Image (spheres, helix red, strand yellow):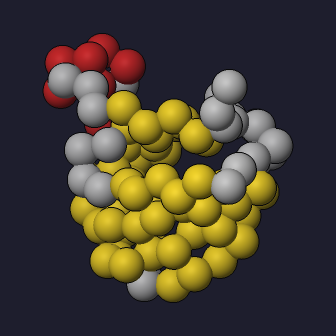
């Protein structure tokens, strides 16, 4: 099973999860390595980036709901400044 799950949920489903009350994280255009300790769920408000992981490239953009699973080692390549709601499980 993939350690990166990208979905496009309806706004109502996001509201039911309380996504819009989660903290917001912002990051400028950059590239960095990251390892997840615990699962993170996030909803992309603005920006565009690729995550390279597990031999795949995941293109992520506004409207995407992404789950990054515990232990994932990846490289973030931010192409347009990112703004996202996030929650660690």
Where is residue 23? Give x, y as percent: 45, 48
User: In the depicted view, which residue is nearer to us: 83 or 10?
Assistant: 10
- Residue at (32, 43) in percent of width and height: 64
- Residue at (29, 67) in percent of width and height: 47
- Residue at (32, 77) in percent of width and height: 80
Q: Residue furthest left?
A: 11
Q: Is residue 83 above or below residue 66?
A: below
Where is residue 68? Give x, y as percent: 61, 41
Q: Is residue 77 above or below residue 60?
A: below
Q: Which image quadrant is residue 81 in?
A: bottom left
Q: Residue furthest front?
A: 55
Where is residue 52? Give x, y as percent: 60, 62
User: In the depicted view, which residue is nearer to us: 37 or 20?
Assistant: 37
- Residue at (36, 32) in percent of width and height: 7
Where is residue 21? Give x, y as percent: 35, 36
Q: Is residue 73 above or below residue 21?
A: below
Query: In which quadrant of the rendered image does the N terminus lie?
Result: top right
Q: Which image quadrant is residue 33 in?
A: bottom right
Q: Is residue 72 visible?
A: yes
Q: Is residue 24 visible?
A: no
User: In the depicted view, which residue is nearer to us: 56 or 21?
Assistant: 56
Query: In which quadrant of the rendered image does the C terminus lie?
Result: top right
């Amino acid at each position: 099973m993939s350690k990166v799950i990208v979905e496009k949920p309806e706004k109502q489903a996001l509201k039911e999860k309380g996504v819009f009350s989660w903290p917001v994280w912002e990051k400028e255009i950059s590239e960095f390595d990251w390892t997840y300790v615990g699962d993170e769920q996030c909803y992309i408000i603005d920006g565009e980036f690729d995550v390279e992981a597990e031999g795949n490239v995941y293109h992520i953009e506004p409207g995407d709901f992404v789950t990054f699973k515990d232990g994932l080692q990846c490289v973030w390549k931010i192409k347009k400044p990112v703004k996202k709601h996030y929650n660690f499980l």
